[in-house]
Image (cartoon, rainbow, N blue to C red):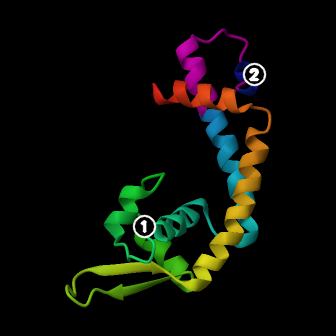
C-alpha cells in the first residue's frame, strides 16, 4: 500500500508520520475485513471479543470489570454489548449468590456454538489478510510492533 497515494498527497511525509498513517490505514483494513467476516453472524467485533473473553473464562463467570480489562478495544459501553448478547441468547447474566451486588456474566451453550462458527469465519479472514507474509516476516513484524 502506498501511503501517499492512499491519502492523496504528493508531499513526502516524515518517516515517523508516514509509519503512523500507514499503521492506521492497515488497522482500518483489518477491521473492515474482520467486521465483514462477522456480518453474517450478526455480531459486532466488540461482541465477538466479549464472547471470546467469556469462553476463555472456562466456565468461570466474569463481571463487567473483567470484560472491560480484557477487551482489545477499551470502551465504556460493555453493559450494552452484554445486553445485546443476552437478547441473542449467547450470554446470561446472574446475580452472585454470595454478593448480591455482584453481577456474573457467562457464555451460554448457544453462544459457544455460535462462537465456534464465528471463529472459522474470522480465521479465514485473518489468513486472507496475512497470506502475502511468510512466518519469518510475521515474526519480524511482531518484533517491530512490540517496540512501539
Q: What residue does disc 1 label? A: 78
Other residues around mark 2 within 10 Å, as few (<14) / some (14–19) / many (≥20): few
Is residue 121 one of those drawn in magenta?
A: no
Q: Is residue 142 left or right of residue 105?
A: right
Image coords of residue 57 (percent x, y):
43, 69
Other residues around mark 1 within 10 Å, as few (<14) / some (14–19) / many (≥20): some
The image shows residue 129, relative to residue 41, as above or below, that is above
Q: To which quarter of the image does residue 115 belong? A: bottom right
Tag 2 or tag 1, which sits nearer the N-term?
Answer: 2
Q: Measuring 20% from the left and 85% from the top, which residue is drawn there?
A: 99
Question: Is residue 79 in view?
Answer: yes
Image coords of residue 141 (percent x, y):
60, 27
Q: Measuring 76% from the left and 26% from the top, which residue is drawn there?
A: 1
Image coords of residue 145 (percent x, y):
52, 29
Disc number placed over residue 2 in the picture, else none:
2
Q: Nearer the viewer, residue 11 or 87?
A: 87
Q: Nearer the viewer, residue 95 or 78?
A: 95
The image shows residue 66, relative to residue 74, as above or below, that is below
Q: Is residue 19 left or right of residue 79?
A: right
Is residue 13 one of those drawn in magenta?
A: yes
Q: Is residue 13 left or right of residue 51?
A: right
Q: Residue furthest bottom?
A: 97
Question: Is residue 89 in view?
Answer: no
Disc 1, SS: helix
Image coords of residue 85 (percent x, y):
54, 78
Tell me the CA gap for discs 1 and 2. Answer: 36 Å
Q: To which quarter of the image does residue 12 belong? A: top right
Query: Which region shows up in magenta?
Result: 7-23
Amino acid at each position: 500500500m502506498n501511503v501517499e497515494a492512499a491519502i492523496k498527497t504528493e508531499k513526502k511525509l516524515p518517516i515517523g508520520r508516514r509509519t503512523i498513517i500507514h499503521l492506521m490505514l492497515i488497522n482500518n483494513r483489518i477491521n473492515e475485513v474482520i467486521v465483514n467476516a462477522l456480518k453474517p453472524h450478526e455480531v459486532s467485533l466488540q461482541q465477538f471479543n466479549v464472547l471470546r473473553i467469556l469462553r476463555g473464562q472456562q466456565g468461570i463467570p466474569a463481571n463487567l470489570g473483567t470484560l472491560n480489562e480484557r477487551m482489545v478495544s477499551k470502551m465504556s459501553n460493555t453493559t450494552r454489548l452484554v445486553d445485546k448478547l443476552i437478547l441473542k441468547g449467547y450470554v446470561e447474566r446472574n446475580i452472585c449468590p454470595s454478593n448480591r451486588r455482584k453481577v456474573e456474566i457467562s457464555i451460554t451453550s448457544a453462544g459457544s456454538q455460535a462462537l465456534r462458527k464465528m471463529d472459522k469465519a474470522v480465521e479465514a479472514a485473518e489468513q486472507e489478510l496475512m497470506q502475502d507474509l511468510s512466518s519469518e516476516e510475521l515474526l519480524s513484524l511482531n518484533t517491530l510492533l512490540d517496540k512501539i
